[in-house]
């Protein structure tokens, strides 16, 4: 497909290309995006950026190599010039609460489309309050949290809800997504973000921004919510048909914020109203447990670990000494053994459903999870470049990019399958 006409110097800029995730994103652009793409890699170090260009040439010698743009995250004049040159900007420079606002603001003002891979929900909530109106006026399509946090559960939920619409002519009532398989280790950037997160945001702000539907553009007024037993609330473990024995997910609150914002956006965007999940929609995420003891151990480890990181600063200092540092991550060889699989169910909102029909979905990827983030970012940029999304401007979620985005992700190795089953 042809790219949209835009009059900018670049179709795409990858900002932070010398970082761990930025490099993987640039490599996927070089490998998989159309060869006539006009693009650039950007960051602080020209010599390091030249190394990225050389690597991209080795990956695909038949395509236009990226240009180099030197820009410092702390230099607003450099950032503004960069943003105005680009139709789409991908930024992988985090922690976003420290380094993300300037380029976010400039993209919103300049009408430059934007994607990132943050998992910092309180930061995203701040950006919505401060810049959504600006983005709507400029026409900038801005998609934060479009990486492993929280694109996979968001697009899987969307796919299950659309399946119920098409197969059962029903909206969605209760949806559950599980991290069924996770073979990976967090990068230095992710770990740095987690540690800074507890230092940067007041606990009250974190709690408020991660409540269900907290960053949805409309309130959830039906009163419907997932039902947890007393034992599940205490021990964190439950067993669900078709999904098995489950426990607390480390990404549950982060992913919930994005999925429930999608719910509200689909109700509000004129071109997406037919995709709205339904007024009584509920959502939750779990992690697959091997057995009850394993599930209980994960639940309490997450609870105790969070308390220590929030309230005991020396623990944060100690953790920093034993983890990957920013810019570091698993090796190429280790990535070959990494994989992730999500599974989910979605129950139709029907007055009568005697056979207990529901949607069952799977989404999986074999390879490094930060490689997967690069795929989500690059394919999201291509979707914005090629498709008439009918979104206008504003802050959107990955699922708002629609079916063609899922189709591109499927072609790039992130597989999604949904079918109807009996509960």
Image (cartoon, rainbow, N blue to C red):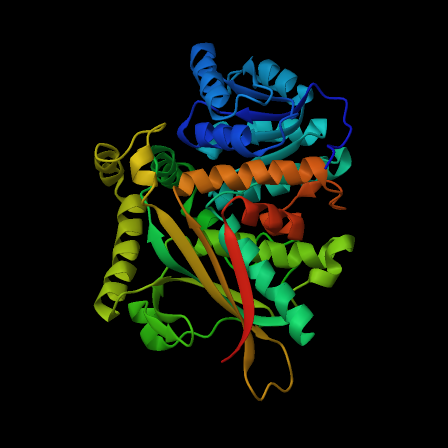
Residue lying at the far top in this picture: please name it: 47
One can see residue 397 in this view: no
One can see residue 31 in this view: yes
Relative to 65, residue 283 above or below = below
Relative to 352, residue 220 above or below = above
> How far across and down, in percent of the image, does residue 86 sit?
66, 23
> How far across and down, in percent of the image, does residue 127 sit?
59, 39
Along the line of sight, the residue nearer the viewer: 63 or 192: 63
Residue lying at the far front in this picture: please name it: 62
> How far across and down, in percent of the image, does residue 300 sit?
26, 60
Residue at x 59%, y 19% (from the top left corner): 79
Please indicate whether residue 393 sits to the left or right of residue 58 in the image.
Answer: right
Could you tell me how many numbered marks the image carries?
0
- Image quarter for residue 303? bottom left
Relative to 131, residue 207 above or below = below
> How far across and down, in percent of the image, does residue 416 sit?
53, 57
Relative to 22, residue 281 above or below = below
Residue at x 59%, y 68% (from the top left corner): 281
Residue at x 60%, y 75% (from the top left corner): 348
Residue lying at the far bottom in this picture: please name it: 354
Residue at x 64%, y 37% (from the top left corner): 382
Q: Which quarter of the rendering shows the N terminus? A: top right
Along the line of sight, the residue nearer the viewer: 91 or 210: 91
- Image quarter for residue 66? top right
């Amino acid at each position: 497909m042809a790219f949209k006409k835009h009059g900018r110097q670049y179709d795409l800029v990858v900002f932070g290309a010398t970082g761990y995730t930025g490099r993987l994103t640039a490599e996927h652009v070089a490998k998989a995006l159309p060869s006539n793409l006009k693009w650039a890699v950007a960051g602080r170090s020209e010599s390091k950026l030249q190394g990225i260009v050389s690597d991209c040439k080795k990956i695909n010698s038949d395509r236009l190599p990226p240009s180099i743009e030197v820009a410092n995250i702390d230099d607003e004049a450099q950032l503004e010039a960069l943003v105005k040159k680009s139709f789409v900007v991908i930024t992988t420079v985090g922690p976003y609460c420290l380094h993300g606002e300037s380029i976010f603001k400039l993209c919103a003002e300049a009408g430059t489309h934007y994607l990132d891979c943050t998992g910092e929900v309180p930061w995203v909530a701040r950006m919505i309050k401060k810049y959504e109106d600006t983005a709507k006026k400029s026409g900038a399509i801005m998609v934060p949290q479009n990486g492993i946090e929280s694109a996979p559960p968001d697009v899987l939920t969307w796919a299950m809800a659309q399946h119920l619409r098409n197969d059962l002519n029903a909206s969605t009532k209760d949806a559950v997504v599980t991290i069924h398989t996770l073979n990976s280790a967090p990068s230095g950037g992710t770990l740095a973000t987690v540690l800074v997160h507890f230092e940067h945001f007041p606990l009250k702000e974190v709690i408020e921004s991660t409540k269900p539907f907290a960053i949805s553009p409309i309130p959830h007024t039906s009163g419907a919510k997932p039902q947890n037993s007393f034992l599940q609330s205490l021990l964190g473990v439950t067993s669900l048909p078709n999904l098995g024995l489950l426990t607390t997910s480390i990404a549950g609150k982060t992913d919930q914020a994005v999925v429930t914002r999608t719910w509200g956006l689909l109700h509000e965007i004129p071109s997406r109203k037919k995709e709205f999940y339904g007024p009584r929609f509920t959502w939750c995420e779990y992690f697959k447990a091997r057995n009850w003891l394993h599930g209980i151990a994960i639940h309490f480890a997450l609870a105790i670990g969070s308390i220590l990181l929030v309230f005991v600063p020396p623990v944060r200092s100690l953790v920093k000494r034993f983890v990957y540092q920013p810019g570091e991550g698993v090796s190429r060889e280790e990535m070959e053994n990494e994989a992730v699989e999500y599974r989910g169910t979605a129950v139709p909102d029907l007055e009568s459903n005697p056979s207990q029909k529901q949607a069952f979905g799977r989404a999986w990827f074999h390879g490094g999870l930060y490689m997967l983030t690069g795929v989500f970012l690059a394919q999201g940029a291509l979707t914005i470049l090629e498709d008439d999304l009918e979104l206008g401007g504003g802050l959107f979620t990955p699922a708002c990019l629609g079916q063609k985005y899922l189709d591109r992700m499927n072609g790039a190795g992130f597989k999604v399958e949904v079918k109807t089953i009996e509960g």
